[in-house]
Image (cartoon, coloured by chain):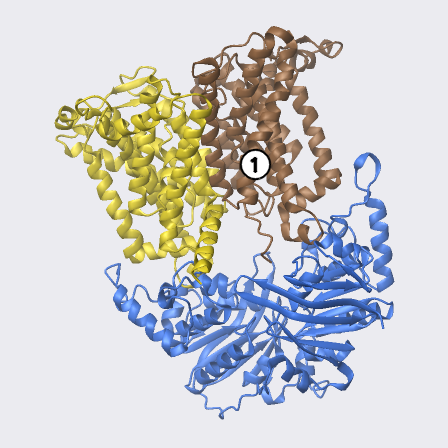
C-alpha cells in the first residue's frame, strides 16, 4: 500500500501535472503563460517583476484567503480520517457564519472577549449542523454525502433569509459587527498596506495543533479512527461506534463552523446575503486531499489553493482569463483522485530501477 | 383555481431539465457509478447550448435552438468521459472524482466564455427554444388544455418521451438487464460474460448526454444566456429527484414535477393566501428538505443499486 | 482415450506468488474428476483459468482434443464449460430466470427479452435433472441449497458438457450433500464431465473416479480413487503424515464459567433465530457447538458477546449476570472472543499490528494516561506478543495489518485474546481458510487453554474439528439445541442427524 514517501510524492506529482495542464491550456489559447508565474510570485510575496519594492497587501490577502481554507481542509481531513466524506462542510461553514453574524450583531459583549465568544458560537453552529448527517447516518444508514448535499442547499437558503431579517440589513448585507466582536486588527491593516489580515491565524494555529494531537496521540482519536476504518471491528472491541461517528462529524462541523466565523469576523466584518456558495467547504476537499489529510499537509495545501485563488484578479487584469486558476485547482484534485495510476507509474519506475541495478 | 392553471406551464418548464438530468443519473447509478458530477455536466451542456445557439441563430433562425440541444448533448457525453475514465479505469473514488469534475466544469466553461465572447458569460441569444402557443386539438380540452397544452415549452414532452424510453430500455431490453446487474453485482455479471467496464462506460456516457441536454434546455427555455449562475444547483436537485423517485423512471417523473411545482409555488406565493406569508427561501429549500424526509422514510429498505459507488476490480473475488 | 480437458504445463503467476506451477491435468470424458488440495494449493486458480476468469502466464489448454484460448467466461461457455462457484454469483433481487439468462438473453419482439421461452426451457431442464426450482422466484427469497441449484441450472441452460464445482458442499447439511452428490452422479451418467474441487476426502470417495492432488501450486499425483485410501490421499495433500488427533489430558472441571438460560434472540430479518437455548460450560472443559451455518449460531454468539440485543433469557459469565451489560464490560469480566469473520470483527485492517493488539485495553493505565496514548509501553507489549505467539509480518509491530497473511492475522487475534487470559474463551470457526500447520498450532493453543483451567466454547462448521477438540458436544438446528452428549459418545451419523433437525432419542441413538 502506501509508504511514507509515496504519501508526499503523489500530491506533489498531482500539483506539477495540474500546473502543467494550465500552462498547456494557456499556450493553446494563445495567452502568455509567463503571466501565470509572475502573478503567482506577486500573490505570494508582493514582488512585481521589474519593479522595485514589495507590496505587502498581497501576502496579507493571501493569508486572509488561506486561513478559512486551512480550516476547511482540517474539517474535511478530520472526517476523512474517521472514514467519512463530509461534503456537507459547505453548509456547516454557512451556518457558522450565520450564527457568528447574528450573535455578534445582536448580543453585545464588552472587550475583545466578544470575539472569542462569537468564534465559539460559530463552531457550535457548525457542529450542530453536522449533527444532522451524523444522526441520519447512525440511525437510518443514510449516506453523509447525500444528506450533506441536501443540507448545504437548505442551509444556504435559511442563512440568506435570516441575514435579510436582521435589524439594519439591506437586501445584500447586514450591518457591520461591532469591532470588538471581530478579529480585525488596525496594526496588521497598516503594516500590510491595508490588507484584511486579521487575528484569525491564531485560531488556525490552535486548530492545526489540536487536529494533529487529537488524531495521533489520544485515545479519543484512536476510537474515532478505529470506527472510521472498520465500524464492526471497533464495535466488537467495545467502542461505542454510533457515538464515535456522530462526534467525528460534529468536530468536523465545528472546524467548518470556525471557518465560517472567520469569514464574518476576519475577512468581511459583516454578513452577506447570497444565494451562492463561497466554496470554502468544497475547496476544503481539495486542500485536504492534496494535503493527505494530515496537519502539515493541510496547511501547505491551504496555502497552495489560497495562492491560486488570490492570483485570479491579477491574471484577469493582465489579459489571462482568471478561470485558469480554477482549472488548475480542479486538475490537481482530479490527479490526486486517480492516484492509483500515478502510483502504478511510480512502482513501475522503482521496479526497472531495481532491475537495472542487478 | 386560476392560479393553479397559471402555475402549470412554468412547472413543466422547470421540471423538464430536472427529469432529463435525473434520468441520466439513473443510467449511471444503475450501472454502478455514482455520479455527483451531474451539476458540472449540466454546466457544460448549458454553455455548449447557449454558445451554439448564439452562433447558429443568424443562419438557422428558430431551428437553432433544437440543433444546439444536439450539440449540447454530445458535449455532455464527451465531458462525462472524464468521470468515466477516472472512476472505471483508474479506480478513483467516485465521489472525489465527481467533485473534481464539477470544479473543472465551472472553470472550463467560463474560461471558454472569456476566449470566445471576451466576458465571463455568453452573449445573449435571440429566441432559444420558444413556447408553443397552442397545441392543435389538445389545447381545446377544458382546464387540462390550458394547463398542459397552451403556452407550453415542448421540452416537457421531450422529457416525457425520454421517461418512457428509459423505462423500456432499462426494464425490457438485454442492455437494461445487464445494466442493472452491473449495478447490483458486477462479479456475477462478469462471470456470465457481461463486460462490466463497457456497460459502466455506457451508463456514464448516457448520463453525460442526458445531463448536457438538460443543461441546454435549462438555459434555452428559462434564460437568454449562459452565466455562472445559470445552472444554480439544478444538477443536485436532479440527484435529489433520482433518490426521491427511488431510481425508477416514473418515480423520477413524479419527483421532477413535484420539485418544479414547488418552484412555481415560490414564484406565485404572493398571490396565494396563507402561502404568501412564507419566506420565498422555503420554496427553494423544499426539494432538498423533502428528499431528506423521503430518505428517512425509505431507511432500512435498500432502494438504490447495491454496488453503486464501489470500485470494481476485476481481480478481486 | 479422448480427454475432455487437457491443461498442459500451465503456470499462473501473480505478483509475488506462483499460484500454479507447471501443472499438467488430463480429465477423461464422462467421469467425475476431483481436485484435492488444501486452502491456497491453487485449485480455484487453476479452474478459474479454465473458466476464462484468468489467463495463464504460460501453458496450453485443449478442449476435446483441440487447442483453445479461453479469454473470458463467454468463450468458456461456448466451449461447453460451466462453473458453479463457491461464493454464489447471483444477483439477489433478480428472479431465477433473469439470473440464468443474463449475458445470453433470447431476443423477442422489438428488441425486448423473450422471457416466456426462457422460463419454459428452465422448467424443462429442472425437471430433467430432478430439481424443483420456481423460475419466477427472487434469489433473495431462496434457501442456500436452492440458490446452488440455480447456479447449476445456469450451466445446464448453456448446454455445458464440462461442469466445474468449486467446494460445493461447504454450505449444505449432510442430507443436502447426499442429494448433491446424487445429482453429480446423474450428470456423469448423462455423459457430462464433472470436475469437483474439494478438500473433503469422504466426498471424493463417494463419487469421484479419479483424483488429482495439488500442493503449493504443483500437481503432485493423479490417483485412481477406488484403489487409493483416504490416508494416502491425505498424506499426498499435506506432504507428511498428519495426526490431527490430539491426546487429551483427563478432565478436571471447575465451576460454571458460562451459563446461558432460555435464550431467545431475534435476527435482523424479524424472526427468532435463537429459540430458547440453554447451555453451560465449566472451567477446564471445551464445549463444541456443532451445526450447519445459518442455524442460529451467529445470532447466539452475537448475543453472548454483546453485539446484538436479547429478546429474553439470561447470560451469566463467572457468576455475574451480563445479560444487559455492554460489550466492554463482558470483556472486562473475563470473556475472550476469537470471531468468525476475522476481517470484519477481529481486526481493523487499516490499523498497524500494534494498534490492533491494544484494541481492548487502550484505555487502561498500562497503555494510556489521561486520554493520551503511551506509545513506548504499547511498543513493548506488541513486541512481546509477536515473539510469544510467533506472529510474522513485514514490518513487525508497525506493519499495516491488511498486508499480513491470513494465518498470521489469525495468530495476531489469538495472541491478543489469549494473552489477556480470559476465563471464558469463545472461539468461532478458528481455522477457516488456514493451512494445516496453522491449524495444528491453533488447536494446540485451544487445548492449552483448557488445560490451564479456562472454559472454552467452540463453534465450528467442521465436524472433524468439533469431534477432535471437544469434551462435550451440543448440536444446534433452527435455533434450538437438538441434543448434548459427551464427545466419546458422539458419532458422525448421530451428529449429522441432529444437524439436520432430527432429535436423537434412545430409539435411534444407536445409529
x and y percent of residue B204 in the render?
Answer: 60, 36
In the visual, does C364 lie left or right of B299? left
Residue C110, picture quadrant: top right
Q: Position of residue A245 (x, y in %)?
A: 40, 50
> Crowding at label 1, few (<14), some or many (≥20) Cα neighbours within 10 Å?
many
In this view of the protein, which residue sits in the foreground, A131 or A186?
Answer: A186
Question: Chain C, which colour?
Answer: blue
Left or right placement of residue B154 versus residue A237 in this view: right
The part of the image, by quadrant, that contains residue C235 is: bottom right
Tell me where residue A85 sits by quadrant: top left
Reading the image, the residue beneath label 1 is B243
Q: Residue at x 55, y 40 (%)?
A: B85
Q: Tag 1's secondary structure?
A: helix
* Chain A shade: yellow
Chain B, hue in figure: brown
Q: Is residue A257 visible?
A: no
Give how far across and how far down residue C434 sits, in percent: 54, 73
Vertical side of B142 occupied by A328: above or below: below
Residue C22 drawn at (x, y percent):
65, 70
Q: Is residue A314 left or right of residue C204?
A: left
Tell which subunit mark 1 falls on: B
Q: Residue C138, relative to residue B72: is it above or below?
A: below
Q: Is residue C213 above or below residue C343?
A: below
Amino acid at each position: 500500500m502506501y509508504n511514507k514517501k509515496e504519501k508526499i510524492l503523489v500530491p506533489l506529482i498531482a500539483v506539477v501535472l495540474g500546473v502543467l495542464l494550465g500552462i498547456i491550456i494557456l499556450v493553446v489559447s494563445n495567452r502568455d503563460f509567463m503571466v501565470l508565474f509572475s502573478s503567482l510570485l506577486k500573490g505570494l510575496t508582493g514582488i512585481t517583476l521589474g519593479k522595485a519594492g514589495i507590496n505587502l497587501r498581497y501576502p496579507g490577502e493571501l493569508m486572509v484567503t488561506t486561513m478559512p481554507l486551512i480550516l476547511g481542509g482540517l474539517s474535511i481531513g478530520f472526517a476523512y480520517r474517521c472514514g467519512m466524506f463530509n461534503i456537507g462542510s459547505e453548509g456547516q461553514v454557512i451556518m457558522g457564519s450565520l450564527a457568528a453574524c447574528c450573535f455578534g450583531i445582536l448580543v453585545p459583549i464588552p472587550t475583545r472577549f466578544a470575539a472569542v465568544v462569537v468564534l465559539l458560537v460559530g463552531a457550535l453552529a457548525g457542529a450542530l449542523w453536522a449533527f444532522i448527517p451524523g444522526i441520519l447516518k447512525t440511525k437510518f444508514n443514510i449516506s453523509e454525502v447525500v444528506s450533506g448535499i441536501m443540507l448545504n442547499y437548505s442551509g444556504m437558503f435559511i442563512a440568506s433569509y435570516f441575514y435579510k431579517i436582521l435589524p439594519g440589513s439591506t437586501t445584500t448585507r447586514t450591518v457591520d459587527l461591532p469591532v470588538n466582536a471581530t478579529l480585525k486588527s488596525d496594526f496588521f491593516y497598516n503594516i500590510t498596506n491595508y490588507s484584511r489580515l486579521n487575528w484569525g491565524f491564531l485560531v488556525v494555529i490552535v486548530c492545526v495543533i489540536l487536529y494533529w494531537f487529537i488524531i495521533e496521540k489520544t485515545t479519543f482519536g484512536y476510537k474515532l479512527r478505529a470506527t472510521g476504518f472498520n465500524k464492526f471491528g471497533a464495535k466488537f472491541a467495545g467502542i461505542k461506534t454510533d457515538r464515535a461517528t456522530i462526534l467525528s462529524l460534529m468536530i468536523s462541523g465545528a472546524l467548518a463552523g470556525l471557518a465560517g466565523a472567520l469569514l464574518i469576523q476576519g475577512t468581511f466584518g459583516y454578513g452577506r446575503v447570497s444565494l451562492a456558495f463561497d466554496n470554502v467547504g468544497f475547496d476544503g476537499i481539495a486542500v485536504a486531499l492534496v494535503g493527505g489529510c494530515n496537519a502539515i499537509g493541510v496547511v501547505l495545501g491551504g496555502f497552495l489553493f489560497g495562492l491560486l485563488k488570490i492570483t485570479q484578479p491579477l491574471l484577469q487584469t493582465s489579459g489571462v482569463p482568471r478561470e485558469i486558476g480554477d482549472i488548475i485547482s480542479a486538475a490537481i484534485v482530479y490527479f490526486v483522485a486517480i492516484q492509483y495510476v500515478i502510483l502504478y507509474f511510480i512502482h513501475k519506475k522503482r521496479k526497472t530501477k531495481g532491475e537495472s541495478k542487478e | 383555481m386560476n392560479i393553479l392553471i397559471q402555475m402549470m406551464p412554468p412547472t413543466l418548464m422547470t421540471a423538464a431539465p430536472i427529469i432529463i438530468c435525473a434520468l441520466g443519473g439513473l443510467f449511471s447509478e444503475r450501472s454502478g457509478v455514482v455520479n455527483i458530477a451531474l451539476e458540472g455536466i449540466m454546466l457544460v451542456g448549458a454553455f455548449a447550448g447557449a454558445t451554439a445557439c448564439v452562433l447558429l441563430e443568424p443562419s438557422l433562425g428558430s431551428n437553432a435552438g433544437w440543433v444546439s440541444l444536439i450539440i449540447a448533448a454530445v458535449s455532455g457525453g464527451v465531458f462525462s468521459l472524464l468521470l468515466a475514465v477516472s472512476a472505471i479505469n483508474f479506480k478513483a473514488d467516485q465521489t472525489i472524482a465527481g467533485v473534481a469534475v464539477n470544479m473543472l466544469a465551472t472553470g472550463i466553461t467560463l474560461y471558454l466564455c472569456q476566449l470566445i465572447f471576451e466576458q465571463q458569460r455568453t452573449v445573449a441569444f435571440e429566441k432559444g427554444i420558444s413556447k408553443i402557443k397552442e397545441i392543435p386539438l389538445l389545447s381545446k380540452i377544458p382546464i387540462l388544455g390550458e394547463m398542459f397544452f397552451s403556452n407550453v415549452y415542448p421540452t416537457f414532452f421531450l422529457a416525457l418521451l425520454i421517461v418512457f424510453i428509459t423505462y423500456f430500455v432499462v426494464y425490457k431490453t438485454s442492455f437494461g438487464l445487464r445494466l442493472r446487474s452491473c449495478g447490483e453485482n458486477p462479479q456475477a455479471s462478469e462471470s456470465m460474460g457481461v463486460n462490466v467496464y463497457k456497460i459502466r462506460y455506457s451508463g456514464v456516457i448516457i448520463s453525460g448526454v442526458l445531463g448536457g441536454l438538460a443543461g441546454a434546455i435549462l438555459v434555452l427555455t428559462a434564460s437568454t444566456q449562459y452565466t455562472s449562475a445559470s445552472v444554480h444547483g439544478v444538477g443536485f436537485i436532479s440527484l435529489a429527484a433520482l433518490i426521491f423517485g427511488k431510481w425508477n423512471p416514473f418515480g423520477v417523473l413524479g419527483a421532477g414535477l413535484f420539485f418544479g411545482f414547488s418552484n412555481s409555488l415560490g414564484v406565485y406565493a404572493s398571490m396565494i393566501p396563507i402561502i404568501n406569508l412564507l419566506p420565498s427561501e422555503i420554496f427553494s429549500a423544499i426539494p432538498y428538505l423533502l428528499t431528506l424526509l423521503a430518505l428517512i422514510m425509505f431507511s432500512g429498505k435498500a432502494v438504490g443499486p447495491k454496488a453503486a459507488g464501489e470500485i470494481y476490480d476485476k481481480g478481486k473475488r | 482415450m479422448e480427454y475432455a480437458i487437457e491443461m498442459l504445463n500451465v503456470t499462473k503467476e501473480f505478483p509475488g506468488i506462483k499460484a500454479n506451477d507447471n501443472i499438467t491435468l488430463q480429465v477423461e470424458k464422462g467421469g467425475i474428476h476431483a481436485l484435492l488440495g488444501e486452502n491456497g494449493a491453487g485449485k480455484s486458480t487453476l479452474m478459474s483459468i479454465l473458466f476464462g476468469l484468468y489467463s495463464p502466464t504460460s501453458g496450453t489448454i485443449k478442449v476435446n482434443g483441440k487447442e483453445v484460448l479461453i479469454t473470458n467466461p463467454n468463450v468458456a461457455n461456448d466451449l461447453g464449460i460451466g462453473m458453479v462457484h463457491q461464493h454464489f454469483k447471483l444477483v439477489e433481487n433478480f428472479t431465477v430466470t433473469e439470473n440464468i439468462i443474463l449475458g445470453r438473453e433470447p431476443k423477442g419482439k422489438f428488441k425486448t427479452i423473450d422471457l416466456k421461452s426462457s422460463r419454459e426451457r428452465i422448467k424443462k431442464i429442472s425437471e430433467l435433472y430432478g430439481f424443483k426450482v420456481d423460475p419466477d422466484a427472487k434469489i433473495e427469497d431462496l434457501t442456500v441449497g436452492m440458490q446452488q441449484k440455480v447456479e447449476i441450472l445456469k450451466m445446464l441452460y448453456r448446454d455445458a458438457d464440462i461442469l466445474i464445482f468449486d467446494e460445493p458442499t461447504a454450505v449444505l447439511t449432510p442430507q443436502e450433500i447426499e442429494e448433491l452428490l446424487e445429482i453429480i452422479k446423474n450428470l456423469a451418467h448423462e455423459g457430462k464431465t464433472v470436475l469437483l474441487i474439494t478438500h473433503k476426502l469422504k466426498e471424493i470417495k463417494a463419487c469421484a473416479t479419479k483424483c488429482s492432488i495439488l500442493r503449493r501450486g504443483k500437481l503432485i499425483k493423479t490417483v485412481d480413487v477406488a484403489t487409493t485410501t483416504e490416508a494416502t490421499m491425505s498424506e499426498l495433500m499435506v506432504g507428511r503424515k498428519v495426526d490431527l488427533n490430539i491426546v487429551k489430558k483427563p478432565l478436571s472441571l471447575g465451576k460454571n464459567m458460562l451459563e446461558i438460560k432460555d435464550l431467545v434472540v431475534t435476527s435482523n430479518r424479524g424472526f427468532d433465530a435463537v429459540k430458547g437455548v440453554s447451555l453451560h460450560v465449566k472451567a477446564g472443559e471445551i464445549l463444541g457447538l456443532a451445526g450447519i451455518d445459518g442455524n442460529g449460531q451467529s445470532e447466539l454468539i452475537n448475543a453472548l458477546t454483546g453485539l446484538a440485543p436479547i429478546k429474553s433469557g439470561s447470560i451469566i459469565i463467572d457468576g455475574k449476570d451480563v445479560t444487559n451489560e455492554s460489550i466492554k464490560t463482558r470483556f472486562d469480566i473475563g470473556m475472550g472472543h476469537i470471531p468468525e469473520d476475522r476481517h470484519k470483527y477481529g481486526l481493523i485492517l487499516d490499523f498497524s499490528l500494534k494498534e490492533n493488539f491494544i484494541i481492548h485495553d487502550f484505555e487502561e493505565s498500562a497503555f494510556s494516561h489521561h486520554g493520551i496514548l503511551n506509545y513506548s509501553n504499547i511498543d513493548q507489549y506488541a513486541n512481546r506478543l509477536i515473539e510469544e505467539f510467533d506472529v510474522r509480518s513485514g514490518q513487525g509491530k508497525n506493519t499495516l495489518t491488511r498486508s499480513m497473511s491470513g494465518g498470521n492475522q489469525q495468530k495476531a487475534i489469538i495472541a491478543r485474546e489469549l494473552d489477556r487470559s480470559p476465563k471464558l474463551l469463545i472461539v468461532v470457526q478458528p481455522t477457516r481458510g488456514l493451512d494445516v500447520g496453522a491449524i495444528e498450532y491453533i488447536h494446540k493453543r485451544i487445548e492449552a487453554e483448557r488445560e490451564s483451567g479456562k472454559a472454552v466454547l467452540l463453534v465450528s462448521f467442521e465436524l472433524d474439528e468439533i469431534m477432535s477438540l471437544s469434551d462435550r458436544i451440543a448440536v444446534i438446528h433452527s435455533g434450538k439445541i437438538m441434543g448434548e452428549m459427551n464427545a466419546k459418545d458422539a458419532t458422525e451419523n448421530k451428529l449429522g442427524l441432529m444437524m439436520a433437525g432430527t432429535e436423537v432419542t434412545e430409539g435411534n441413538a444407536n445409529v
